[in-house]
Image (cartoon, helix red, strand yellow):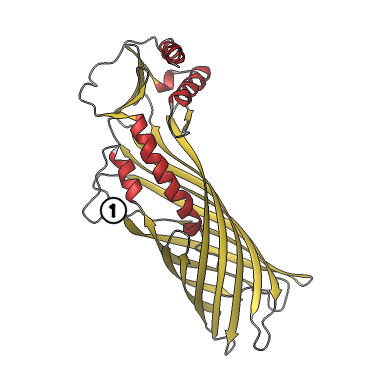
Amino acid sequence: MKFRRLLATAAVTSLFLVKAAQGFAQTPSVLMGDIADDLDEFANDISGALPFMASIGLDWADAYIGQLIDITPHWGFGITAGANTLKLDKLNSLLRNFDYQANEGFMDKQLMPTYVANARIGGFRTLPFDIGIKWGWLPYLPIFKEDISYEAVLYGLDFRLELMRDWGLRPSVSLGFEVSRVTGGLRSKSDLELDAGNGIKLVTSGDATIGPVWEAWVFDAKLQVAKKFWEPRFNLFGGVRLGAALTKTGYQLAGSGSDIKIESGGNSQNLEDLNDKARNDFAEILNDTSENDISFEVTNEGITGWIDKFGVNLNLHGGVSFNFDSGFRLEMALMADIIHFELGANIGLRYQQ
């Protein structure tokens, strides 16, 4: 193992032809191994949380909205505002590695808002189904003192098949399948020296940013029951969702020019000056020395260390819809993640034919 590490250090040193830059003595130094431990804990949390967060937006009150080709055609669109609780204590621990400071209002469990635009079209007479799409985002919460670039978006597609039609005292029942994509990240300018071991250091300066990033594919199977009363004024609905998420959680150094330097053996080189082969070789070296199964991607614009996780979610939801003669509907619902003990609520306004 010692001989292998010596070879790795020699390979990195051979990549660099420029003399070491001066002036990094005062830069805070962080062990990448410490980041790995905190990242692994945060990745476990978010792999379970993302299916719950992604569930907002397509649980319409009607288990099935009707046929598209009909008199009148059945379709609708609207907006939904929701919020759910989310554990952030592990995120706070991870951010401390990057010298972020939480403000006094930060709590280990935060209420995270989500805004979603959604639409749905009915199916055809031979097969009672409908299809929905959504696009949403999570607005920035000022829970950190430093200026942070924040982005978090989700979008999804679902298909629902009616199993039983609303008739008399009998409710309507549908079985649906949904696929969602969730991406996000927190980034801030930071001058840091990341110690990768074996004499290898990553140094950020200038406009370089660093912070956690995440992305996931979320797959849901959902069963929904709905019953209309005093048609079309009032609709009760509820259901259960079983979700699974394939997540990638990591931390990313991004920059241009001389914002990111790689130092080894007394030599230094800008990240953007490495050719494709050198970047691939360097990614392999980082992978060999990484902990907690972190895999690295190296481009001319940044370095990202990823951890892959698999998360599951069991979500119960229920609510009520108030229907108006104009075609507008006001919908309110509560939801609960009974595996991770998180709660949520949403309210939506939509136009539906």
Q: Residue at x 51, y 79 (%)?
A: 321
Q: Residue at x 46, y 21 (%)?
A: 285
Q: Quadrant of residue 16?
A: top left
SS at circle 1: loop
Can residue 178 be spotted in the picture? yes
Q: On the image, numbered disc 1 is attached to which residue? A: 142
Query: Between residues 109 and 328, which one lies in front from this camera angle?
Result: 109
Q: As drawn, is 43 to the left or to the right of 135? A: left
Q: As drawn, is 175 to the left or to the right of 80? A: right
Q: Residue at x 23, y 26 (%)?
A: 27
The picture places residue 108, in percent across and down from the top left corner, at: 31, 54
Image quarter of the C terminus: bottom right
Q: Does residue 186 sit above or below 85 in this rendering?
A: above
Q: As drawn, is 205 to the left or to the right of 124? A: left
Q: Which residue lies most toward the front here?
A: 1
Q: Quadrant of residue 177?
A: bottom right
Image quarter of the N terminus: top left
The picture places residue 172, in percent across and down from the top left corner, at: 65, 78
Which residue type carries mark 1?
Pro
Q: As drawn, is 120 to the left or to the right of 252? A: right
Q: Does residue 228 sit above or below 255 in this rendering?
A: below
Q: Does residue 297 sit above or below 128 in this rendering?
A: above
Can residue 185 be spotted in the picture? no
The picture places residue 51, in percent across and down from the top left corner, at: 51, 56
Q: Does residue 301 sit above or below 324 in this rendering?
A: above
